[in-house]
Image (spheres, coloured by chain):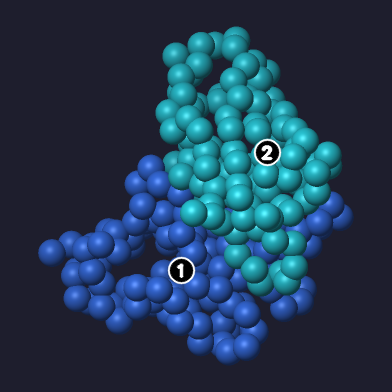
Chain colours: A blue, B cyan
Amino acid sequence: AQSVTQLDSHVSVSEGTPVLLRCNYSSSYSPSLFWYVQHPNKGLQLLLKYTSAATLVKGINGFEAEFKKSETSFHLTKPSAHMSDAAEYFCVVRKLTGGGNKLTFGTGTQLKVEL
Amino acid sequence: DGGITQSPKYLFRKEGQNVTLSCEQNLNHDAMYWYRQDPGQGLRLIYYSQIVNDFQKGDIAEGYSVSREKKESFPLTVTSAQKNPTAFYLCASSILKPMNTEAFFGQGTRLTVV
């Protein structure tokens, strides 16, 4: 079975400092992994996705994620936080089931950015 | 513009009533999904469909029903059997392959039982 675990429900950083949002996955084979961002009362926007072409994935708004198979991790990082980064972030795995394929979400990490 | 449209944005329901949430996409995607979002629980899958006239139960299907009569449309009915329907509902769509293809989301419907 495939699933994802987001290790922190809340992360607080100061503007201009690095961001680290942690995600671990469990999978019996090469997973399809994504990070999405959600601003309050909005839909979800894709930040980046792992395509197996490269372990370091660059996304929008300066975010990156590194796929580490040995650690079963796909942590999201950004060198310098901006106030506009305050939002909820979801790590997602796409998995095959008997009925097809579906997305399974982590429980989310709320990022707070302080002045 | 291509995308997914959910309506209404806000919906109020009296206890004991059924309500239907609309989801339409013009992306020509085969797969469509309904998720429920509650604080601290992430998104939980209600139903999904990969082809017209076929759909599968997700993790929390009880008290919900769907139909997929057209490729573009995947309405969700919240029935009176759903014990705690107040939540934020998100619809998504995607192509089926490859597996690393992302899903696109609507802007959501916030349902409140009054």
A104 or A37, nearer to the observer: A37
Of all residues, the one furthest to the left in this rendering is A115
Say if residue A38 shows up in the picture: yes
Number of residue marks: 2
* Left or right for A75, reference A77: right
B20 up-or-down from B95: above or below: above
Foreground pick, A83 / A115: A83
What is the three-letter code of the residue carrying label 2? Answer: Phe
Q: Where is residue A97 in the image (x, y as percent from the top left)?
A: 81, 57
Name the residue nearer the viewer: B1 or B84.
B1
Residue A47 marker: 1
Identify the residue position indicated by label 2 in the image. Answer: B74
Write the residue at 74% across / 62% down. B96
Give the chain letter at badge 2: B
The quarter holding residue B15 reads: top right
**Horizontal side of residue A105 vs A86, given as left or right:** right
Q: Is residue A71 above or below residue A13?
A: below
Give the class, few, some or many, for how many residues have Cα within 10 Å of label 1's Cα (few <14, many ≥20): many
Dot 2 surroundings within 10 Å: few (below 14), some, or many (20 or more)?
A: many
Q: Quadrant where the C terminus of chain A lies?
A: bottom left
Image coordinates for residue B37, horizontal then vertical, percent: 52, 41
**Image quarter of the N terminus of chain A:** bottom right
In depth, the one of B108 and A31 nearer the eye is: B108
Percent across and percent down for residue A109 are 42, 58
Residue drawn at point x = 35 percent, y = 46 percent: A40
Q: Distance between the residues labelled 1 and 2?
A: 25 Å
Label 1 residue SS: strand
Observer-side mark, 1 or 2, equals: 2
Q: Please tell me in which quadrant of the rendered image residue A10 appears.
A: bottom left
